Amino acid sequence: MKRNVKMMVVVALVFGASVALADKLSDFKDAASKDGCDSIPYSDLRSTCSSGGSGVTDWCKNSSRSVSCGSDSITRDLKNKIEQARKNVENLKDKKRKLEDDKSRATADDDKNRIGKEIEAVDKDIYEAGKLVEQAVADLETRKRLVETTMDNINKCIDYRRSVMNVFASALDKVRGETDPDVVPYARQLRDKYEETKRGHEIAITEKNNALSTCKDSRP
């Protein structure tokens, strides 16, 4: 009786191992035919990858999120615009002061009236020039907010890409350790696929770090 029980246990273990191997082989075959996170046959890593992949899509590929600050010359041009606009206001104020001096020295009514009209015209110019200063300052503030928001977006993008890249690095280590003869050919295919995917994320992260550096240089 005891011998029969032992035999049944052995048979059950062998059967269980065979089923597990068959399932594993099926997982690897299925994974080898797919790309991205779906190409990972290990359920825990695949789940982590999918979660991180959603973050990559949202923070790196979403067109509504800015991930580029453009050229740092944009900020310089805006600052120069403010400086020039303010200089223009000061020049107009100097012009007004000189006209007021001329008016105070004028003796003829015609001269006083003429200079008075010139002063009125300069006052309008000063008002319009002041509005240009305000607009230039507002444009620079908008640029500042864009740069800050973009830097936040890029940092999140990098974090999610690095997370997904690390998942593929872990998957790469695991497939390299597969020894079952039936699984090894698929593991080899997956290894090459993971190496390529990992390099792709490395390149993308480098590009985003370069973009981040440009943003830092673009801070007003």
Image: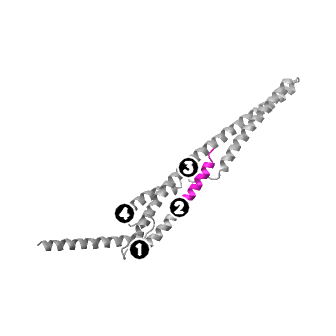
Under tag 1, what secondary structure?
helix
Instruction: Indicate the quadrant where residue 17 lies.
Output: bottom left
Residue 186: give its label: 1
Whole-number angstrom distance, CA of label 2 to CA of label 1: 24 Å
In the image, residue 47 lies at what x, y percent?
A: 39, 60
Task: Report the mark closest to the observer, 3 or 1.
Answer: 1
Give the mark nearer the N terminus: 3 vs 1.
3
Our reading of the magenta stretch's main secondary structure is helix
At 40% from the left edge and 74% from the top edge, which residue is drawn?
184
Task: Confirm or deny contact between disc 3 and disc 1 (CB under 8 A).
Answer: no
Q: How many marks?
A: 4
- Pick whichever of labels 3 and 4 is earlier in the sequence: 4
Q: Is residue 155 left or right of residue 76?
A: left
Label 4, residues with CA under 10 Å away: few <14, some 14-19, many ≥20: few
**Residue 116 shows which numbered tag?**
none
Q: Hey, which residue is sitting farthest left in the picture?
A: 1
Q: Amino acid at mark 4?
A: Ser
Sequence-wise, which precedes: disc 2 or disc 1?
A: 1
Question: Which residue occupies 75% across, 38% down?
Answer: 88
Please name the amino acid that badge 2 sits on: Glu
Q: Is residue 153 visible?
A: yes
The N terminus: image quadrant: bottom left
> Please, is residue 76 above or below residue 114 in the view?
below
Numbered mark located on residue 151 in the image: 3
Residue assigned mark 4: 43
> Residue at 50% across / 68% down in the picture?
196
What kind of residue is marked 1? Tyr
Q: Which residues are magenta?
A: 200-220
